[in-house]
């Protein structure tokens, strides 16, 4: 296959990649990955994220956002600083690769609802950033789809779009999310797990023009690498499984998911960072 493709979600700024990031990037390129989108999770590590993206400006594209599991009592001050960083980035005043999305943001009530209200407020604030800056959202959601959907409906007409990251749900959940017409589902390694229903559900209920590829590196490595550190090269395994599930060529999956990325993020496989 000659067409390259995109990993829309990889935490390559994490400590898991400190020792061998050049090799990780090289393996991704060799596997056909031309671009990798890197979400922020907090304010403290934002400089590290930007430094990594600065080293690979044609490959890595940053996002700015506060992950719901990082929301604490100081979330208002954190978001104030993050928003200023975002605005400076978009204005080109801080010599960084241009931010392509607001993320990784959302709601996560999987482990605890201790910061339930703070997460909701922080998420809504960042949804407003997406509207104000006309940037797509990279949304993380666990055990909170009802709350997330209710909040997003308030801004649906004004949001430019985004990704429901790491989708692992059923057909009804997919239909609800796809009712947001400018959004797509992020499909990663879970697709390859024996326990997953995605291989059967997606072709029946989700058109290919509503899917983007992702790894969520270093987490959720696809079979046969499950349990190992995930990396962007492994997104090729997700692409291969999607092709088998939809009964189309890998080339068609690459072309269509690239077009979906271009539509949502305004970034294509041949674009260079600015």
Image (tube, rainbow, N blue to C red):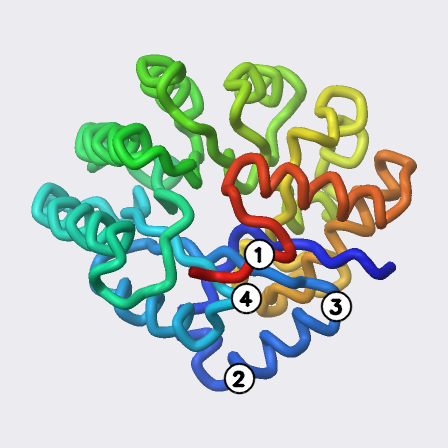
Q: Secondary structure at mark 2?
A: loop
Q: Earlier in the sequence, mark 1 or mark 3?
A: 3
The one nearer the camera, 90 or 214, is 90
Q: Earlier in the sequence, mark 1 or mark 2?
A: 2
Q: Examine the rendering and report whether any part of residue 131 can be seen.
A: yes
Contact flag, marks 3 and 4 (Cβ < 8 Å): no
In the rendered structure, the answer to whether residue 40 lies left or right of residue 269 reads: left
Please state which of the two labelled residues, at mark 1 or mark 3, is closer to the viewer.
Answer: 1
In the rendered structure, the answer to whether residue 227 lies left or right of residue 46 reads: right
In three-dimensional space, the C-alpha distance between marks 4 and 2, rounded to whole angstroms, equals: 16 Å
- The residue located at (24%, 52%) in the rendering is 91
- The residue located at (47%, 69%) in the rendering is 57
In the rendered structure, the answer to whether residue 66 lies left or right of residue 237 reads: left
Which quarter shows the N terminus?
Answer: bottom right
Q: Secondary structure at mark 1?
A: loop
Q: Earlier in the sequence, mark 2 or mark 3?
A: 2
The one nearer the camera, 175 or 131, is 131
Q: Earlier in the sequence, mark 1 or mark 4?
A: 4
Q: Quadrant of residue 215?
A: bottom right
Is residue 220 depicted above or below 181 in this figure?
below
- The residue located at (60%, 50%) in the rendering is 268
Q: Secondary structure at mark 3?
A: helix
Check residue 31 in the rendering and tell me which mark sits there, or answer none.
3
In three-dimensional space, the C-alpha distance between marks 1 and 3, rounded to whole angstroms, equals: 19 Å
Please state which of the two labelled residues, at mark 3 or mark 4, is closer to the viewer.
Answer: 4
Please give the residue where the numbered disc 4 appears in the rendered image. Answer: 59
Q: Earlier in the sequence, mark 3 or mark 4?
A: 3
Q: Residues within 10 Å of mark 1 (few under 14, many from 20)?
A: few
Please give the residue where the numbered disc 1 appears in the rendered image. Answer: 271
In three-dimensional space, the C-alpha distance between marks 3 and 4, rounded to whole angstroms, equals: 14 Å
In three-dimensional space, the C-alpha distance between marks 2 and 3, rounded to whole angstroms, equals: 17 Å
């Amino acid at each position: 296959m000659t067409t390259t493709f995109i990993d829309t979600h990889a935490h390559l700024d994490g400590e898991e990649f400190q020792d061998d990031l050049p090799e990780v990037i090289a393996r991704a390129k060799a596997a056909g990955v031309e671009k990798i989108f890197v979400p922020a999770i907090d304010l403290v590590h934002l400089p590290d994220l930007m430094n990594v993206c600065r080293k690979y400006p044609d490959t890595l594209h940053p996002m700015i956002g506060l992950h719901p599991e990082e929301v604490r009592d100081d979330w208002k001050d954190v978001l104030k600083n993050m928003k200023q960083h975002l605005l400076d980035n978009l204005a080109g005043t801080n010599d960084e690769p241009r931010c392509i999305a607001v993320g990784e943001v959302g709601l996560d009530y999987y482990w605890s609802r201790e910061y339930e209200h703070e997460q909701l407020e922080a998420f809504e604030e960042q949804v407003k950033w997406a509207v104000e800056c006309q940037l797509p959202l990279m949304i993380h959601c666990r055990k909170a789809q009802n709350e997330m959907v209710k909040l997003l409906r308030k801004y649906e007409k004004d949001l430019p779009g985004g990704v429901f990251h790491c989708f692992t749900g059923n057909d009804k959940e997919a239909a609800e999310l796809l009712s947001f017409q400018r959004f797509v589902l992020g499909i990663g390694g879970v697709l390859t797990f024996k326990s997953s229903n995605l291989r059967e559900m997606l072709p029946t209920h989700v058109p290919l023009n509503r899917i983007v590829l992702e790894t969520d590196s270093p987490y959720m490595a696809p079979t046969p690498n499950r349990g190992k550190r995930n990396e962007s090269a492994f997104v090729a395994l997700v692409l291969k499984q999607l092709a088998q599930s939809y009964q189309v060529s890998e080339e068609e999956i690459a072309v269509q998911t690239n077009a979906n990325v271009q539509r949502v993020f305004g970034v294509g496989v041949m674009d260079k960072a600015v």
